Each structure stands twice: as structure tokens, then as C-alpha cells.
Image (cartoon, rainbow, N blue to C red):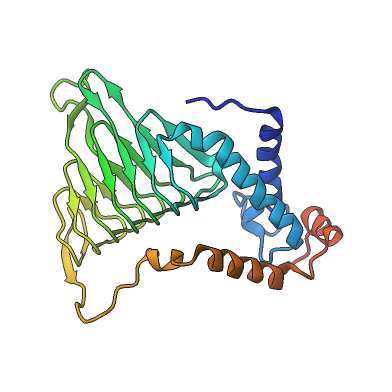
Amino acid sequence: MRATGKPWIFLAGYLGRRLGCSKLKAATLAPNTKPCDAMIHDQRPYRLKKLYLWIEQRYAQQFIAPQLASLGPGFHLMKPWNIRLHGAHISVGKNIHIVTADDRKVSLSTWQFEDNSGHIRIGDNCLLCPGVRIDSASEVQINDNCMLAAGSYITDADWHDIYDRTRAVGTTAKVRLNSNVWVGDGSIICKGVTIGENSVIGAGAVVTHDIPANVIAAGNPARVVKHLDPARTLVTRASLFTDPAALAHQNDQIDRYVLTKNSLLNWLRTYFFPRRGE
């Protein structure tokens, strides 16, 4: 879906890209290193960072929220201009945290075609990291407090028939991640899979069948390699949001402490003329 809005919002998105980056590439960096990757210390003044966070919030409200069937309160979308939404029936709960990068966009896509109608439902307090992709032609249900690490992929379809390669979508089957599931870096969750609550999927795993609750699964195809200790208390992401106002105040106090001595002139200098170690 193409977003439309006031021209100043587009300018705000551009400024957000620039303000979120504290310096240009130094001569000693690797050839493919981007400017933001060069940052050792955040040189932005406190008020400049607050402006950047405001731009992120306004961009998300103007361009991301209208493309969703629902978006709960308390959302934090980092660099929301790198979020790609395609199709209808995408719902997101409260306190969602989506982290993106210019080279690792987050993509949520549903397919509506003939008998297929994709749905993506993401619960409360979930975390999506850079490069996450979720594609649905039937239903992907992600319950509360789930974490999807960088580059993980969830799909409920084959996307082409095995024998008739001209037929789109192919076989579909619903995917369900129960509460507190943690999907590791680069993992793939295939159609028809249910993952039990609290379970962890190891990095690079390919999950082709159901995974029970309270286990760690890894490998290709994924299998259970360890059971969680029932004697240990599991602290979930829900605990972060028991007092949202206190959390916001704490984060603001950290920013004030870390950034309060930074000046606009020094930030501009480090942006255009960085020195080693900055």
C-alpha cells in the first residue's frame, strides 16, 4: 500500500535518516561500512535526539499505522521508513518494538488471491529485529511477548505448487507461535508449524514440524536439544511494560545523563570531520 500525506512528513523522514546517524564514514572503515555503523559514541545533543525520536513517532503515525488493521498503543518503531507492509489484515498489539536498518528492512506481507486470504496477527509486547520477514496466505498468529531475531522468516505457504509451478501460493497451513517464543537469528518457520509457549528456536534452524512448550530446538530440520529448567523463573517482555510511564522516564533520564554534555557544534564537527575514537 502506498502511503500519502503532507510533504513535510517526507522531509521529516529524510531528516530522521540523517539525524539518526552521528558521523560520516572514516577513512579507516571497511569499504561497505555505512556512516551510522561508524558511531562509537553518540555525539548528538539531548534535544537533537528527542527531535529524532519525535520524527520517528510522527512518521509511524502518518505512514505505518494507516496500513495496519490495528496498532496498539505504546509502539516503538525504530527507523520506521524501513518497514514494508503489503496487503490487508495485518494486526499488531500494544508495546510492539520493531528495529530496522537501511540494509535490513522488516517486511510483513499478506496475500489475497482466489481462496487464499492471508492474516498476520502479532500480540502484545513483541520484538521484531532487522531483516524479519513474515509472509501469509492463510494465517500467522504470533502471541504475546514473542521475540523474532534478525533475519528470521515465518511463512504459512509454499508460494508455488510443487507439481504445477505456474500455480501461485501452493499449499498453505496456519502458523502459530505461542506466548514468549524466541526465534533465533536467521531461523525459518515453515507452514503448519505450532511452537509451544516459552520455547527457543536456535539460530539458523529450519522448523518444519511442531515444537513443544518449554524447550530449545535447533538444526535443520529443527529438533528438541534441551528442555528448559522448570525450577527457573522465566522473565518475559511483559515485565518491561508494567509501568510504561516509569519506563519512559527511565529511558529519558539515561539519555539526559549520556547526552547532556554534547553540543550541536561538536555534533556537526563529528558528523563532517570525525576523529579517530569518536
Point out residue 262 in the picture as x, y percentages from the top left corner.
79, 66
In the displayed structure image, the side of residue 270 where residue 149 appears, left or right: left
Q: Is residue 53 above or below residue 275?
A: above
Give the side of residue 38 with respect to residue 93, left or right: right
Q: Nearer the viewer, residue 188 or 34?
A: 188
- Residue 15 pos. (x, y %): 71, 42
Provide residue 203's location: percent of width, then percent of height. Answer: 31, 59
Query: Exactly how many numbered labels are in the figure?
Result: 0
Outermost residue to the right: 265
Residue name at image x 23 percent, y 33 percent: 138
Q: Residue at x 69, y 63 (%)?
A: 42
* Residue 102 percent across, percent down from the top left: 56, 44
| Figure quadrant of residue 260 | bottom right
Residue that extends furthest to the bottom in the rendered view of this protein = 231
Q: Is residue 80 left or right of residue 53?
A: left
Quadrant in which the C terminus is drawn: bottom right
In the image, 123: left or right of 60?
Answer: left
3 to 130, vertically: above or below: above
Quarter of the view holding residue 26: bottom right
